[in-house]
Image (cartoon, rainbow, N blue to C red):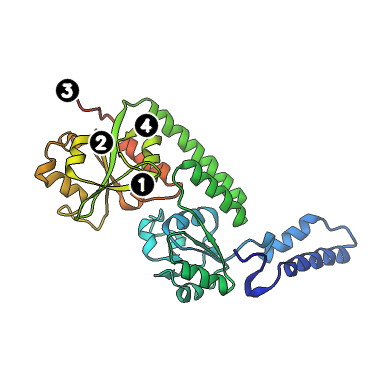
Amino acid sequence: MTDGKARGGREWFVPVAVVSLLACALLWTDGGASTGKDTERLLQERGRLDGAPQAILPAAAGSVDLACALVPPERIAALPEAALRYSGLRDPESPYLARPRFDLYEAERILKAAPDLVLAHPWQNPDTTERLREAGVDVLVLPDPKNWPGVAEQIHQLGVRLGAEAAASDLLERCEVQLAGIREEASARKPLTVLAYNHGGTGGLVAGAGTTHDEVFRLAGLRNLAPRPGHAAMSFEELLMLDPDVLVISQSGLQSARGGTLSVLRSEPALAGLGAVVDDQIVVLDAWLYTTLSHHILDAAEEVLQQSSGWSPRERAPR
C-alpha cells in the first residue's frame, strides 16, 4: 500500500474534493432534484467509484486466478507469462489471455503496463516490490493460503479492495455449493490414506500439514500420511514403509510417458511392491491443479474424488 497517498504522490483528499464538486454540480443543474444515485452513476462512468483500481496486475498464478474471477478483462493491466501455465485460465479463447504479458517480476517490466495495483506474494523479490511502491504503485502482498477458509477470506478481502464485492459474494456462494457436494460425496466413500508425491529426478517430495495438498485431501475425505509439515523430502524406503492406499502426483502436458513422477513410480524396481503402484491407485492431476493456491483447490478435491471413485483400502498382511 502507499500509506494514504494515491498514484503520483497526490493526497487522497483530491478525489474526495472531486466527488464533492460533482455532487454539488448535479444539485445545481437539477435544481436540487438529483439523488445520490446520480452521483454514483457519474462516478461509475468515470471509473473511479470508491477509488477502485482499474489496472490490476496479478504477479503469480494464485492472484491471476482470483483477480480474473473478480474483475472483467479490461481491468487487468497485464498477466505473468510464466504463471499462466499454473493458473486456471485453461480456455485458449479466454479474453483474459489477450491481455498484455510480462515475463519477470521486475519493476521496469511491470511499470510498462502502467498498473495502479499489483498483487504480489511474500516469496517474490522484495526489492521489486519496494521499487514499485517508490514509483507510486500500490502493491498488495497476498500470503499463500493454506486451507479453504484462508482462500475464502482472501476472496472476500480482494472483493473489497478491488471494488468487486458483488463478484466476490457470487464466487463464494458458488464455492459453498461446490464444497457441499464435495463433502457429501466424500462422506459416502471408504476411508483411504494418501500422499502427494513428486519426484523431480533427484529425490522425492511429499506435502504435509500446512499445505493446500493437505487441505485438498481433507476435503476429499482422505487421510494424509505425510509425517512432517510443509513440503519435505521422502526416500523410497520411507515411502514403502508408509505404503499409502493412494498416491496423488502432478503430470504436465509437456512431460512424455518416459519422464516424470509417474514413470519413476512404474519403472523403479525398489517401488514395485508399493500398494498404490500394485493396485494402480494413482491420481494424476494436471500441473496447474496440483499447485493451485486459489479457489481451484475445490476443483482439485473434486478431481481426486472422481479419479479415486471405487477404490478401496489395500488389504495388508500384519507386520
* Lower sequence index among marks 3 and 4: 4
To which residue does mark 4 refer?
221
* Lower sequence index among marks 2 and 4: 4
Which residue is farthest left? 269
Q: Secondary structure at mark 2?
A: strand
State the residue at coordinates (18%, 25%).
316
State the residue at coordinates (67%, 62%).
51
**Considering only vertical position in the picture, is 313 above or below 35?**
above
To which residue does mark 2 refer?
246
Amino acid on which the number 2 mark rests in the picture: Val
State the residue at coordinates (19%, 35%).
241
* Cα gap from disc 2 to disc 4, whole angstroms: 12 Å
Q: Secondary structure at mark 1?
A: loop
* Lower sequence index among marks 3 and 2: 2
Q: Secondary structure at mark 3?
A: loop
* Lower sequence index among marks 1 and 2: 1
Q: Which mark is residue 151?
A: none
* Cα gap from disc 1 to disc 2, whole angstroms: 19 Å
To which residue does mark 3 refer?
318
Amino acid on which the number 3 mark rests in the picture: Pro
Given residues 318 and 9, the one toward you in this image is 318
* Cα gap from disc 3 to disc 2, whole angstroms: 19 Å
**Considering only vertical position in the picture, is 243 above or below 128?**
above
Amino acid on which the number 1 mark rests in the picture: Gly
